[in-house]
Every structure is written in structure tokens, then in C-alpha cells.
Amino acid sequence: MVNIDFSQLGLTGCGGAGFPTHVKLAARNVEAVIVNAAECEPLLHKDKEIMRHCSDDFFKGLTRVLDVTGAKTGYIGMKKKYADLLDWLSKNLPDPRMKMLPLGDFYPAGDEYELVYEATGRLIPHGGIPLNIGCVVMNVETLLNLGRNKPFISKFLTLAGKVPHPCTIEVPIGITVREALELGGLKKIGGMRIIDGGPMMGKLVANPDTDIVSKTCGGLIALPEDHVLIKKMSNSDKKNSQIARSACDQCTDCSELCPRALLGYPIRPHKAMRTAQFAPYAESNYAIDSIFCSECGLCSLFSCPEDLPPREMCMISKKYHLGKGVKLAEFPGEPTVHPMRSVRRVSIERLIKKLALLDYDHKAPLQQVSKSYDKVTLPLKMHIGAPSVPVVKTGDRVTAGQLIAVIPEGKLGAVLHASINGKVASVSDQAIVIVRE
């Protein structure tokens, strides 16, 4: 089991940037594996549904990671409010190395910096990663896929928002956003926009007929196009900069509630706002600490009493300074947890109210999908690193699970497999399209 070549499974993180899993599993000197089962984004439920219905494979995956890395402990970080599931899992842990890690109902409980601190009491150093303090952080679906020990060709996601039947589904990677939403009963999308991911850190879908369910898609949320979240997500950098310059009163609420600042990292979003007023596009060292921004969105979507965009200003500043070669590790000192952290964290209940999502806060039970699909579009880059290199050509017949693209030699990346049976309709430097015969 330890000698499996994980790189051939095509596994990546199933949210965020999609870091190739086999690279994480090459880590040694690991003390703890920490599972992100917090699912802190409002409206998303797929991780809980996986653990309810697929716990055997999930536990197999966690056992495999503990064996491969040599970690002594596997913490499963889950919110206390899911008491029934947490209690059931606690009683059915198959390995003495596994422990449940009850978490508070705050955002962003699933941030790896938060998880590492909650599990170990230690802080990741400036510019570091969890491995620097002996930790590896994994998400639930990645562990499920490791337990299945099969090519990564299907994706779990939650359908939420203005969907007639909110649910969690497992579908082939590469189907369109529209095809996925139809499984929740949403047939007409006119007058709505779709968020790929959660309401805090997700991105707007450009076209539901061409955008696809990728390896990192954790949910699709349909909201009216005049919803406050959609309006904010639709703003350009130029518009956000204009808004930031026009109305910020420097109250510093964004900095006082910033989760990374409360952990002791030198990020102060109000400085990015201040810089926007006096140095357009952050061409000033005054906002250099924006490179510590996790882009969680709490400042823009909750903290700011003026509904201004501190996160977006941090992102502009961050892009500028990282482009200049600034490194997080260059900052002196070590982080020290803020003494007010425990009373400044923001609950999901308050967040949902502020986001105007109460009407959409529903359970999303796992729904079996029996439908077959006639076409999938598989991008060659659904992960951090270099695009995969096709090993098939137009006209080739492929079967689900067959290798169709490989990692370029000497590069960080992930292999790619066909997600349906069919014929390769096209191969480009962007994607491979497969149609069912």
C-alpha cells in the first residue's frame, strides 16, 4: 500500500488552487495529518455528505496518508455544531492514530493556518507551509479519492442558492455547469448568475454552457443577478479602486476582524485601503503586508461598515508586491496570537445574515446520479503547476479512467484521465474534448 504511485491517480486538492496530491504525499518528518472537514463556506455541504455516506473509503484514504507520511496523528477537523456526525465518527474511528478535532462555528475555520493552530497550538512561520512545523493538511474529498485508489474522474459538489432541490451530487469531471445545475431542478438560468465555489471565495461562472465542473469545484450557487454578492463579484479592479478611494473612513474594522491578523500575521487591510487613496494600484510599501492576505473575503463581505472592498485592494497590492519579488519569509519576527482572537471571530450564522443568504440556507443531501453524458471538456490545467501534456490524439477511442495527459518532465503538475467512455473529438493546448459514441 505504501508503494503505490500516487502520481498516476491524477489527484489534486478538491478546492482552492488544486495542489497535486502526490507531491504532498512525498513529505517526510510529518508529525500530524490534519483533515479539513470544517466546510466553513456558507451553503456548502459536500464534505459532510461524503463522510456520512462514504466514510469507509475516507478512512482508508486517511490511513494511507498516515502510513505513507509516517505521521503519528490524524486530526479530523469538524465543527461542533454537527454533533450527530461528529459523535458517530468519533465512535467509529478505525485507527487509534485518528482523532476528532471539534471546531467552533466561525469563518474561516477551514483555513489551513487556523486548522494547524487549532490542532497543534503552533503557528506556521512567515512565508512557510504546514510542513515547516510537521503538518500536512488534506481535504475530505482528496482522502476519499485516495481510499478509492482509482483515477480522479468524478467530482462531488453541492448545488445551492436558487436551486429548486438543493443537493450534493457526484458527476463526471468536464460536464457543463448547466448540466450539473439541472440535477438540482434548475432548468432556466435567465436572470441569475452562478458562483463556482462558496459565496466568500468563489468566482462567477462566465458561461454556464461552456464553463465546466473541474477538479476543484466544490459547489455551484445560483443567485439572482441583482443579489448583493453577485454585484460585488462583478466589480472590476478599476471600479473597486474607485470605490475604495471614495468612501473609506479608516475605521480599521477590516484589520481588527482579519482572521490572519488575529493569528498574529502582519496583515492590515486598512493599510491597503489607505494606500488606494494616495497611491493608485498600491505602488507604495505602506501596503506591502497585503502579501499575507489569504483572500478569505471577510473584510469585504462582513467587516466593513461601508461595504467597501478591502480584500480586493489587498489582492491588487499583493499582486504588485509579489510581482516585484517580495517574499513573505523576508518579514522579521514570529506571529503571536492576538489576545482578542476568541471574541472577534465571526460566526457563520452572522455571516449568512450579512450576505443575505438566509433564504438559501438549506441542507443538501447526497443525491445519486444515474444520467450519462454525451460530452466532456477536460482542461489540461486544473491544478497548480504546468499544464498536462496530451498523450491521445483526435479520433482515439478512450474509456473512463484511461490516461489521456501526463505531467511534463521535471514540472509540478497532475495527470489527466478520461471521465467518460467515448472518442476524442479534439485536442488543443487548452483542453481535451471527449464525446460519447
Image: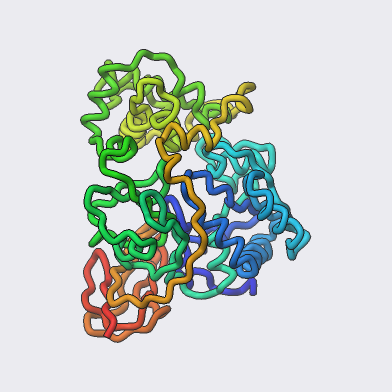
Residue 185 sits in quarter: bottom left
Q: Is residue 97 left or right of residue 292?
A: right
Asked if 388 appears above or below 295 in the picture, the reply is: below
**Res. 268 visible in picture:** yes
Residue at the spot x=39%, y=30% of the render?
300
Is 230 left, or right, of 18 in this rendering?
left
Asked if residue 334 is positioned above or below residue 130 in the image, the reply reads above
Residue 282, picture quadrant:
top left
Q: Residue at x 29, y 79 (%)?
A: 392
Q: Position of residue 346 (x, y in %)?
A: 54, 31
Residue 43 spot, x, y in % from top left? 47, 47
Residue 342 image point, x, y percent: 63, 28
Q: Is residue 324 visible?
A: no
Q: How is the image coloured?
A: rainbow
Judge by depth and name the residue closer to the eye, 283 or 400.
400
Horizontal side of 259 relative to 360 (left or right) equals right
Residue 424, x across and y down, in percent: 26, 80
Q: Is residue 13 above or below residue 297?
A: below
Compare residues 140 and 81 and report the one nearer the observer: 81
